[in-house]
Amino acid sequence: MSSGRTIVVGVTGGIAAYKAVNIVRAFVLRGDSVHVVATPAALRFIGKPTLEAISRNPVHTDLYEGVAEVRHVAIGQSADLIVVAPATANTIAKLACGLADDLLGNTILASTAPLVIAPAMHTEMWNNAATQANIATLRERGVVVVGPGTGRLTGADSGAGRMEEPDTIVTAALAALDAADRAAPARRVTPGDLDGKRIVISAGGTREPLDPVRYLGNRSSGKQGVALAEAAAARGAVVVLVAANLEVPAPEHVELRLVSSAADLERAMNVAAGDADVIIMAAAVADYRPAEVRADKIKKDDTGDTLVLTLVRNPDILAGLAAAKKPGQVVIGFAAETETDPDRLLGLGREKAARKGCDYLVLNRVGWTEGFASERNAVRVLDSRGDIVIEASGSKMSVAERILDLLR
Ligand code: C5P
């Protein structure tokens, strides 16, 4: 079963770089999505094609590639975990100073994910006071340092400085990930501060049927909406979760209403909205549905080489709920956009907040590797005037907690 975590493996320029391949492979075999960020020096020790083949993803090195998609921060923001192996004395020094003169440095600075490093260097370099001070600084900041071990080094000498074995690094990295997951909800939960509030939350992605076997859908997993429902229930709210095709289990202690299409979701939301104090539309709702739902399966023999579908506009459920808002009711919408320019993204969010008429709009970027599948999210929340009231990034649960803080 896929565990679906997004893991960045940083590879720096040491002989032990060849062992990074086994680390990458172990994560891939677990079902994680692995992105290798190699320093230019690392690629003098190990070939990019090897890392690309094993990670099944492009390997990034250059800070100035992919600038339009803001890659220098995007990779770090999407990471659930960063593992740097091997970590050279030079990279450790740069991390301790917070330097960002290469893609790996930028990625690490832009991330809130747990960071695990596996130092590898000669004994003298490891024992050097500068390296030891840098390691102490990193440990103080919560960086997990695995090894180094003691043993045969690259030359004839042996001593401390040998990179730990890949299995040991992977085990330590997964333990760090677990610890971060466990800490995330606990860190911000304030039990009881939403006591008795009735909160209706939609989550997931709608499916618009074409025929008895096919539908038009989207990649929403429902994770962010489910995190909101779970966190709200833990804080004492009475939660109705209107769930459209969730890819994750629904939380306990919520009233679940299962829906599939936008029309189902609209009906369920309108019913539940009646006595709600808060309405949160986290679901990805199809803007269009097939004009006709065929009673029988569409046959390619009847349609030929091309098939033209006519789609009709679905109602805007959020705008409808906002227009019908009862006094005191709070309506929160979401806007998932692929725009890469942060200013233009904000502009789109402001237009949407005004158009939808909701009290708050949660703005986040989505793309092929961002948003839906990830365990993490990075959002800006706008109020009805378009002012940013919250900027939050981290696990979807920690983002949920920040959004719910608006309702206390
Ligand atoms: O217009 P856009 O789809 O970007 O707006 C996103 C927000 O509007 C989300 O909160 C989503 O749940 C909601 N929405 C809706 N009805 C639609 C389309 C989107 O309620 N037909």
Image (spheres, rainbow, N blue to C red):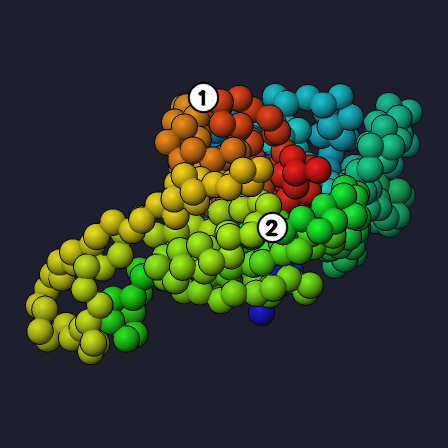
What's the residue at 59%, 55% (across, down)? 226
Q: Where is residue 102 in the image (x, y as percent from the top left)?
A: 59, 26
The one nearer the camera, 145 or 206, is 206
User: Looking at numbered disc 1 in the image, what kind of residue is underneath it?
Assistant: Asp
Which type of secondary structure does the marked residue at label 2 adopt? strand
What's the residue at 88%, 42% (across, down)? 160
Q: Position of residue 337 (x, y in %)?
A: 41, 37
The one nearer the camera, 113 or 184, is 184
Q: In this view, does 93 lie above or below 155?
A: above
Can I make out residue 79 in this image? Answer: no
User: Looking at numbered disc 2 in the image, what kind of residue is underneath it?
Assistant: Ile
Sequence order check, earlier mark of 2 and 1: 2
What label sits on residue 322 in the rendered view?
none
Give the labeled residue for mark 1: 343
Q: Position of residue 201 (x, y in %)?
A: 55, 52
Which type of secondary structure does the marked residue at label 1 adopt? helix
The one nearer the camera, 97 or 164, is 97
> Where's the C terminus, which quadrant?
top right
Horizontal relation, residue 197 to residue 126: left or right: left
